[in-house]
Amino acid sequence: MEKLLQQDIDDLGYLHSFSDEELKVLENVDKAVEELSVSELECYLKREVNLEGPKIAKKYGLQRIPIKKEYGGLGMPPLVSTLAKMRCGQLGLGFSSYLNVQLFLTEMTLQRWGSDEQRAKYLKPAVDGDSILAFGLTEPDVGSNPASMKTSFESKGGSYVINGTKYLITNGERANAVIVFAREKGNPDGGITAFLVDTKSEGFSVAMELREKMGLFTSDTAMLEFDNLEVSEENVLGPRGKGLHVAYSALLNGRLGIAAGCVGIIEGCLNAVLDRARERVQFGKPIGKHQLIQKHIAEIRQNLEMARWPTYFAAVRKAEYEKDMDNRELLAEMDLRASLAKKIASRFAFESADHAVQVFGGFGYSLLSPVGRLFCDSRVTRIYEGSDEIQELKIASSLLGKGFEAFE
Ligand SMILES: Cc1cc2nc3c(=O)[nH]c(=O)nc-3n(C[C@H](O)[C@H](O)[C@H](O)COP(=O)(O)OP(=O)(O)OC[C@H]3O[C@@H](n4cnc5c(N)ncnc54)[C@H](O)[C@@H]3O)c2cc1C
């Protein structure tokens, strides 16, 4: 087992007693990450989406981790999925982003809101590793405020016709199905509904594959278009008109996943700088013997401590919430904890990657170095699934109370 993952498990032993089954799942995650590391590096340098990611996830059952056993999953508690995501994050965020959408934004959303038929048709193949899913909320003109979305649907006989564009959609290029959010045509004040859209449907197209990114090269990011795309009543996910509830419940899961990926980035940086500081010699001694380099290493280690505990704790609160999902107090607490974890961990991931690049010097500025890649990947965590600013508004308004929602 990778040593920092082992340390996480040992430290968490004070909060959670890991079963043999849980430890086996984490061993498999560790093996999957090891096996994926070569193709992730090759694809990153070639700026290619890594098609091996979902295959290796399937081989080791990663796409089953948080889903209940009755739906073909492994039924692991949030703490185990969090540790799994942390281990994946050590590799960078390409594979981690694919997994975040697959597990937390889509599979868990289908588990929560899907009908039996929808779970059989969309969740089961995803959990079995035979289908990739995407989550389409953001649009070219609509990001932080999804309530203002323009993608529309209108009723036509017993079905719905969807028109619009979704932008920056992870997994969008290779997804078999997408959860698409659309507003009822002619209803500017509401009616937002979630739909399950098969990407083979007439009227669906990938309008653009975004390759010109700052990092995350191994994950696909696409613009999707819906041109008079027709879906049936059976494709409505969750209550009609309650699409934003569906979206926010997905983001709640997703934010904890992002926080875990960020802790992984810090761990990846720590491993890399320790090796480099021992090996690289300047002024006749390993740079690790220069005190200012030691300061960078100590900063990264402190950042790890500051990022991982809010993330673990959000996972513990999530486990409580999952036992009683109608409890609004537990939901509010979980929401706050997920925002805190994401905000804190993404800041420390970015800062740690910056320290790590400094330790590596000129080589750190190259994408050939692990820390160069981690630095580039880390930046997006302060933007996607709710930017820093949106997390801060959520944190403050949850403390100030009702009526202080500055972002609505
Ligand atoms: C690589 C990548 C992958 C992504 N994957 C997905 C995906 O799979 N599915 C999906 O639906 N979306 C995805 N996104 C979109 C992402 O969630 C949005 O980029 C994010 O929510 C921010 O929206 P925006 O980019 O439109 O920024 P904007 O909303 O335009 O915000 C611009 C700036 O203004 C700030 N701001 C906005 N409103 C306020 C306010 N009220 N107060 C203070 N500041 C404010 C923001 O914090 C930000 O700093 C992805 C994005 C990226 C980069």
Image (tube, rainbow, N blue to C red):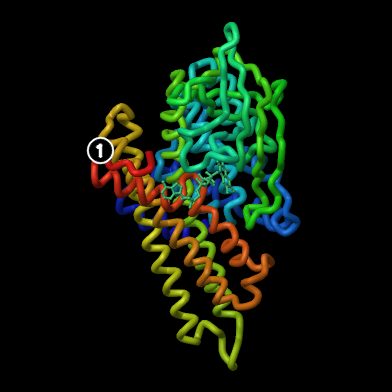
Residue 348 drawn at (x, y percent)? 44, 62
| Residue drawn at the location 44% of the way across and 38% of the way down | 76
| Residue drawn at the location 44% of the way across and 60% of the way down | 347
Q: Could you say which is closer to the camera, residue 229 or residue 282?
A: 229
Residue 97 drawn at (x, y percent)? 57, 46
- Up the image or down, 367 lies above or below 291; here it is above
Determine which residue is flagged by label 1: 402
- Dot 1 falls on a residue whose secondary structure is loop
| Residue drawn at the location 47% of the way across and 28% of the way down | 69
Q: Residue furthest bottom?
A: 284
Q: Could you say which is closer to the camera, residue 272 or residue 29?
A: 272
Residue 234 drawn at (x, y percent)? 55, 14
Q: Left or right? Give the position of 400 relative to 163.
A: left
Q: Left or right? Give the position of 271 relative to 176.
A: left
| Residue drawn at the location 54% of the way across and 15% of the way down | 117
Q: Amino acid at mark 1?
A: Lys
Q: Left or right? Give the position of 335 relative to 235.
A: left
| Residue 92 quadrant | bottom right
- Up the image or down, 175 lies above or below 88; here it is above
Residue 365 drawn at (x, y percent)? 64, 71
- Up the image or down, 268 lies above or below 227; here it is below
Q: Could you say which is closer to the camera, residue 210 or residue 255?
A: 210
- Up the image or down, 342 lies above or below 332; here it is below
Q: Is residue 395 visible?
A: yes
